[in-house]
Image (cartoon, rainbow, N blue to C red):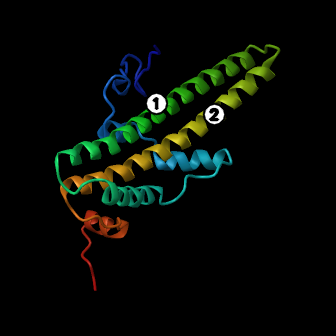
Amino acid sequence: MRVELLPGMKNVLRFPIERRARPTLDQLREIAPDVRKVLNIAEAFGMDPPAHGLREQVDAATAEHIADQVPTSGPGRAAMLTELLDPVIAAAVAACRASHDAWLEAAEAQQALLRAQSGELFWIEPLRERAEALTRWAADRLLVAYVRVEEAEGVARAVGVARRGEEWMPRDGRAEADALFGFAATG
């Protein structure tokens, strides 16, 4: 087990509850990577950024699947909706954990490289190669985690609409932003 200090603290340990708790959507939202960081990392490493609108695509595909495969009522409906959502959330939480662990390992490799450079040791090149490879791997894991989170959010929206018994409609980001910021629709 690694000891993790809270950022900016010297004596406050962080106990990673996400390692022990059952994966939930709320937990996923707490550990999900920030889109700004994901886009910056993708650009810095020359990687393709995640597909734009992935969440909406998964939302629509899941809504279509629910309409075609899940009964409109009955005792099995809730169980089928849960079976759709839970594995996707668990996969997204696992991807976020893997990303976090990869960044910790990359940071340790960078620290080992810095210690070797400051001590003017020979054989620094293998340490540099390892640190670069682990950092690239961590960047890749971050992008994978972001994609898994977007997929989970899309499935969660479609399942939530189905659970509430509402008719599924495509998400309108502009209308949501207007409602959030209190803008009245002008017509």
Residue 56 to residue 75: above or below: below
**Residue 108 in which image quadrant:** top right
* Left or right relative to 102: residue 69: left
The residue singled out by tag 1 in the image is 97
Label 1: element kind: helix
| Picture coordinates of residue 113, whole percent (x, y) | 70, 21
| Picture coordinates of residue 115, whole percent (x, y) | 68, 16
Q: Amino acid at mark 2?
A: Trp
**Residue 123 in which image quadrant:** top right
- Quadrant where the C terminus is found in the figure: bottom left
User: Residue drawn at (35%, 66%), measured in percent from left and top?
Assistant: 170
Q: Amino acid at mark 1?
A: Arg
Tell me the CA gap for discs 1 and 2.
14 Å
Count of number-bearing discs = 2
Residue 12 to residue 156: above or below: above
* Left or right relative to 12: residue 139: right
Label 2: element kind: helix
User: Residue drawn at (53%, 46%), measured in percent from left and top?
Assistant: 38
Tell me which numbered mark, 1 or 2, is placed earlier along the sequence: 1
Q: Residue lying farthest right?
A: 122
Check disc 1: other Cα within 10 Å, few if <14, some if 14-19, many if 20+: many
User: Residue drawn at (38%, 16%), measured in percent from left and top?
Assistant: 11
**Residue 32 in which image quadrant:** top left
Residue 124 to residue 99: above or below: above
User: Residue drawn at (72%, 17%), measured in percent from left and top?
Assistant: 118
The residue singled out by tag 2 in the image is 137
- Quadrant where the N terminus is found in the figure: top left
Front residue of 95/3: it is 95
| Picture coordinates of residue 178, whole percent (x, y) | 30, 69
Front residue of 71/49: it is 71
Tags 1 and 2 touching, CB below 8 Å: no
